[in-house]
Amino acid sequence: MKYYLGIDVGGTKTHALIADEHGTARGFGAAGPGNHEGVGYDGLAAAMQTSLQAAVAQAHISPAEIAGAGFGIAGYDFPSERQPTLEAIATLGLDCPVEAVNDVVIGLIAGASHGWGVVVDAGTGCNVRGRTADGREGWVTGCGSLFGEYGGAGDIVFRAVQAVSHHWSRRGPATALSEALMRKVGASTLTDLIEGLALQKYHLHGEYARLVFEVASSGDAVAQEVIRWVATELGETTKAVIRQIDIQNQPFEVVLIGSVFNGGPLFTRPLQETILSFAPGATFTRLSTPPVVGGVLLGMEVAGLCTDELRSHLIESTHAYQALWR
């Protein structure tokens, strides 16, 4: 029996999943954060090792029995990071083919019917990656506003603060966002809010994006425009990745990942309209499978195993393990 490993390394936690050659999940392991930007490459190696050891113990196998491994690594954003990433993986002592990708890519592999298409991640920040059936890749930095990449919860809050500032200065229209943010931080007046933000007395965080959605849902036109603008910007970034891999004239799937999509049509509609204006064959799906499944599928792929017939069973069998890592 051959076994395949997937590891999903994140900024807060690391997951490892082992499945057999029939696509049956056999073992799961968890560890803490592994993003090298926060814990260094030694921390990355340690998180992977901890999760791997737990997974092989549960699967009752040794690492030597693993025939292929796929890694989704948060913080692996640029080509120059490939070598130190592979060196961290090498410390696991695996004797099999391995592949490492940015962590959102394994979400694409897990969520798309055939493991290719485009993935759009909108959490605190945002990222977009693309992958074709023949292995071509498209990507952006995932580094946010410095590079004109908007689409995360932090961007929604940032844009909302600008709208509130324009209300205060009378550059723009009044908005219920002002009162909502005043209540949220405990500001006594709008001027107090602006001054407090400027002097760092008050601090706003990405989780406040939910408040922007609440105000928008109540009918506030300014809040609605904030969300529309951010969603459209994310759509433009997605179009760039689609253009890179040249799939705009064919059907493909767009996998949506991240908490911002919980905001519903206020966000998804302008995003989808922007993408469909350029790639009318795109269809959209929310990721409902643990991304680490994509790591296992990547491990199978790099080992030369055809995953089409195994995908559904792997997803189904993995759901039985999910309670272990919640």
Image (tube, rainbow, N blue to C red):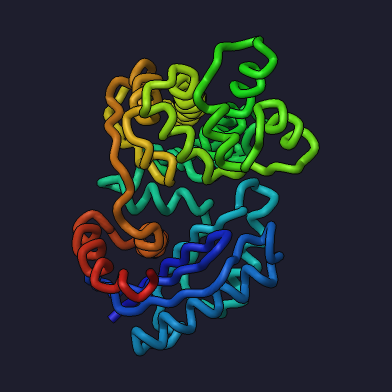
Query: Furthest-front residue in view?
Result: 188
Name which residue lies at 49% across and 30% down: 241
Q: Quadrant of the C terminus?
A: bottom left
Image coords of residue 143 (percent x, y):
64, 40
Q: Is residue 211 left or right of residue 46?
A: left
Report if residue 239 is visible in the image. Answer: no
Name which residue lies at 54% across and 80% down: 50
Q: Is residue 170 above or below residue 296?
A: above
Name which residue lies at 24% across and 58% down: 311
Q: Is residue 290 left or right of residue 71?
A: left
Q: Is residue 191 left or right of residue 230?
A: right
- The answer to which quarter of the image holds residue 318 is bottom left
Q: Quadrant of the N terminus?
A: bottom left
Report if residue 215 is visible in the image. Answer: yes
- The answer to which quarter of the image holds residue 299 is bottom left
Image coords of residue 124 (percent x, y):
54, 45
